[in-house]
Image (cartoon, rainbow, N blue to C red):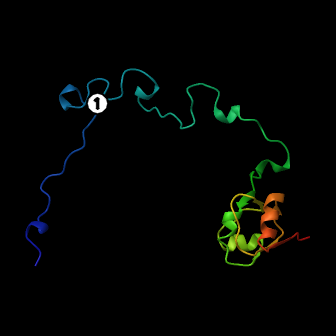
Amino acid sequence: MPSLLSKLLATSAKQRKRLGRGYGSGVGGHTVGRGQKGQKSRSGSTVPLWFEGGQLPLIKRMPMLRGKGKFVSFGKRVELTLTELNRITATEVTLQTLKLEKIIGSRAQGVKVISTGEITKKLTLIGLVVTPGAQKKIVAAGGSITQST
């Protein structure tokens, strides 16, 4: 059976402090916690998040991009190390298998395999860009690299 205390209703609720009601209210006086002067001390003032105090805004300081590709984001080719290739369960490695195994993100449009780390598996890389150092290590481990057309 639940206790009687848990069924009792609250008898008082704490009131919020009302600002700007004089010195006797216990919250500030004529400045009411807003400091001295300035834009944010005035009533009804809101400063936009991007406002920099009259300084030339960041959006205007950045260079404008020209041409068709201005809405295309940069950096779509992902660098992949040989150590990360060891985590793959498949023997044939393509862009799709890397996305399915979540080694790279789903928005990546290209992969460049670099020679960082060691590879122990025999893998066949299809349609990936491979650096010469990484190519030597993959072939030494028994793998092969083919370029798709």
Q: Residue at x 84, y 69 (%)?
A: 127
Q: Position of residue 3 (x, y in %)?
A: 9, 72
Q: Residue furthest left?
A: 4
Position of residue 117 measured from the top left corner of the image (x, y, whole percent): 68, 60
Relative to 18, residue 4 above or below:
below
Split into 4 quadrants, where in the image is the C terminus?
Answer: bottom right
Instruction: Assign the N terminus to one quadrant of the image.
Output: bottom left
Where residue 122 sits, quadrant-wise, is bottom right
Say which residue appears at 14% left-offset and 58% top-offset. 10
Q: Nearer the viewer, residue 54 or 29?
A: 54
Any part of residue 124 in sight: yes
Give the class, few, some or many, for how many residues have Cα within 10 Å of label 1's Cα (few <14, many ≥20). some
Pick whichever, 16 or 134, lies toward us. Answer: 134
Label 1 belongs to which residue? 20
Q: Is residue 105 visible?
A: no
Task: Name which residue type carries label 1.
Answer: Gly
Secondary structure under tag 1 reads: loop
